[in-house]
Structure formats: C-alpha cells, structure tokens
Image: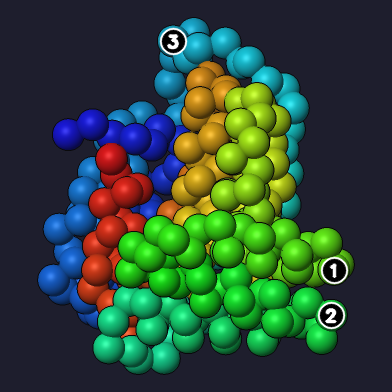
Amino acid sequence: MRIGIRCETFPYWSMNIIRATTRCHRRWLLPLACLCLACSHSSVPAQQQDRSKRPPLKSPAIQSEIDRLRTKALEPDPKKRPLVISDRAPNRKEWLEKVLARGYSTSGHTNSKWDAQVHSAFAAYASYSRDSKWDLYKPMVEAVSAALKAGCDDPFARYMDTRYRLADTRPGDEAFALASLRACAPMFDSRYHPVLKFYAGYRAMEATRIADVGGNRGPLIALTTVALEDLARDTNATSDEIFEAAEMWVE
C-alpha cells in the first residue's frame, strides 16, 4: 500500500480514530484502520529520525505558512472536543447541501450583498462534487467569483475559489501551495463541518507535497487528521462520505 502522508504526526491520533470509529461507525473501521497504520508507520518520533535523509527544503515561504498553523488550538483528545452532528439526509448530495447551509449560516460571513451568489455556488458544488454534474462546474466557479467580487470573505467560498478558479489558471507550484495554505487556515477556525475542513487541509497537503518535497507538514497533518476523526464521529454522516475521505487520506 502506498502511503500518501508522511508520519510527522503522533501515533496517538491513530488510537483516537480507532476508538471513535468503533463506537460510531464499525463498518468504516477498515479504511480508518489503514490511516492508523499510516500515522504509526514509524515507531521513532519524527524529531528523532535521521533528518539527513529528508530532501532539502525548497520553499522557506511554504514552511513559514505551515508553521503558522501551530498557533491554532488543537485538542488531541476527542472527548474534550465538541461533537459535531450533522442533519441526517438520504444521500450524499442532500447531506452536503445541509452541511453547507448550516456552515454558511453560522460562519458569521453572511451578507445580502453576496448571499445569493454563495447559495448558488454551494448548490452547484453539491451537485458537481456528489452527483457528477460536470456541466455545473463553470456556473459554480462564476458564482464563487461573483461572491468574492461583491466582498464575500466566507472561508469556504475562498477555499472554493482557490481550489477551482485559481487552479484553472495554472499558477506556479509554490504560488498555488501558498494560496492553498492560506485558504485552508481560516477553515480550521470556522464553524464549517469537519468534512469541509478535511478537504481544505487535504488539498493544501497535495499542493505542498508537490511544491516543497522536503518540508515538515506536521501541523497541517495534525489539523487535517483531527478533521477526519471528527467526521468519523458524526453518526449522521453518510457512509460513502466517511469512507472516501479516509481512503483519500491514506493513498
């Protein structure tokens, strides 16, 4: 099995995921157990490993952006973190629509100047990403752009702009990695559901691995893993939603 994350975080996350999954979603134990193997792949703490084997740092700017994530509150014990329970839905698309609506309404960034554009963008995103409605890609990107031009500072709208519009412009690897990190950082502080925090962190991980092979992504890994764990604790999340996120994290 090819492991797509470096083991720069703590094996402690592994046991948390096992415990949460066993209590809430036994049928998803396998993919999350794979995550545990990934996180505990090495029994030697990262700081004690031979740093001479790590590729040289390419981008001090990227590392500096990642290091800023260390200032974010991070509670490793799930029992001490709020339990996020979504509204039940019959399928992934409707579930995501509810998740997006709740996140936006509680984010503190609503405004009549851009609410309509944000709702249009989120509706298109749910259909595009969960129902494979590829024809909605352009309307989705345009709606997000319109919201931002109107002054929208919602963290998920900004993440979507980076993930889609900016990516389409094919910026340099370092520029895209920095933009992805700056887009995911506010998501970790937001009221959005853990599934959306996970994807923001995951996409930033992808971008930084390409742009800065030798970088230490420990803080980003930790925050993204916590988001995945909190997704698994949501007893109303659809099975496919949890399974797909876990599978992506260990590939």
Asked whether the viewer can see residue 82, the reply is yes
Q: In the displayed structure, does residue 118 sit left or right of residue 27?
A: right
Q: Residue at x 27, y 88 (%)?
A: 90
Other-residue count near label 3 (Cα within 10 Å), few / some / many at <14 / 14–19 / ≥20: few
Circles 1 and 2, Cβ within 8 Å, touching? The answer is yes
In-image side of 151 versus 173 (left or right): right
Determine which residue is flagged by label 2.
113
Q: On the rendered image, what quadrant is the N terminus found in? A: top left
- The secondary structure type at the circle numbered 1 is loop
Image x and y of residue 81, in percent? 52, 75
- From the viewer's perspective, is residue 73 above or below residue 202? below
Q: Earlier in the sequence, mark 3 or mark 2?
A: 3
Residue matched to label 3: 53
Q: Secondary structure at mark 2?
A: loop
- Residue drawn at 28 percent across, 77 percent down: 238
Q: Quadrant of the rendered structure where residue 50 is?
A: top left
Q: Of the numbered discs in the image, which one, if any, rests on residue 167?
A: none
Q: Is residue 95 above or below residue 72?
A: below
Q: Name the one closer to the observer, 186 or 125.
A: 125
The residue at 23%/31% (across/down) is 2
Of badges 3 and 2, nearer the viewer stands: 2
Of 246 and 67, which appears nearest the observer?
246
Instruction: Answer yes or no: is residue 85 visible.
Output: no
- Which residue bears the numbered disc 1? 150
Q: Residue at x 57, y 84 (%)?
A: 101
User: Distance between the Cα atoms at labels 1 and 2?
Assistant: 6 Å
